[in-house]
Amino acid sequence: MGRFVIEKGKNGAYRFNLKAGNGEVILTSEGYTSMAACKKGIASVKANAAADERYERKEARDGSAYFTLKAGNGRVIGVSETYSSAAARERGIASVRRNAPEAEIAEPVEA
């Protein structure tokens, strides 16, 4: 089962990573100014993870594949790592779909 891990950075911003059952990071958020806003971001990931139209498949400058997950209002709520192929990117999207809805939220750690 996946889990959301919240970190508080040295600049005071909160960020979450969605980790798969094997501990690999599969989605990273933007920085949030408060813990409450960060938790709202997690709720948005959970709510939007199942909808294929919320995923934007992209290509980095170096040609590697990645994706973003967007909320219903079009704002990006998470970004993936880069992948070696489009097929690997699709496996990453499938992992977010599988892990996010039931993922627990781990206590925040100081970065």
Image (cartoon, helix red, strand yellow):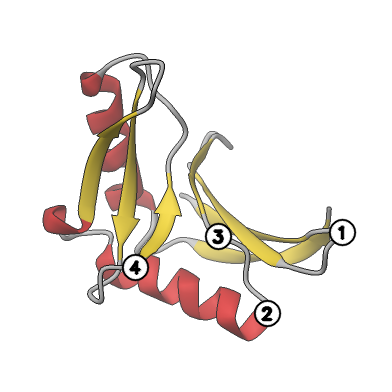
Q: Nearer the viewer, residue 23 or 92?
A: 92
Residue 11 is situated, as x and y percent measured from the top left of the image, at 83, 63
Residue bearing mark 4: 75
The residues tagged by marks 3 and 4 sit, at their Cα atoms, a distance apart of: 11 Å
Q: CA distance from mark 2 to mark 3?
A: 13 Å
Rendered image quadrant of residue 44: bottom left
- Dot 2 crowding, Cα within 10 Å, few <14, some 14–19, many 20+: some
Q: Please state which of residues 93 and 59 is positioned toward the viewer in this rendering.
A: 59
Nearer to us: label 2 or label 4: 4
| Residue 62 on image: x %, y % | 41, 16
* Comes first in the chain, label 3 or label 4: 3
Q: Earlier in the sequence, mark 1 or mark 3?
A: 1
The amino acid marked with disc number 4 is Arg
**N-terminal-most mark, 2 or 4:** 2
For the residues labelled 1 and 3, the Cα–Cα distance comes to 15 Å
N-terminal-most mark, 2 or 3: 3
Query: Mark number for residue 10?
Result: 1
Residue 30 circle label: 3
Residue at horizontal 38 percent and vertical 51 percent from the top: 99
Q: Which mark is residue 84?
A: none
Give the residue at x 30% y 61%: 70
The image's mark for residue 35 is 2
Residue 39 shown left or right of residue 87 in the figure: right
Q: Residue at x 43, y 27 (%)?
A: 82
Q: Secondary structure at mark 3?
A: loop
Going by the numbered disc 2, the residue's amino acid type is Met
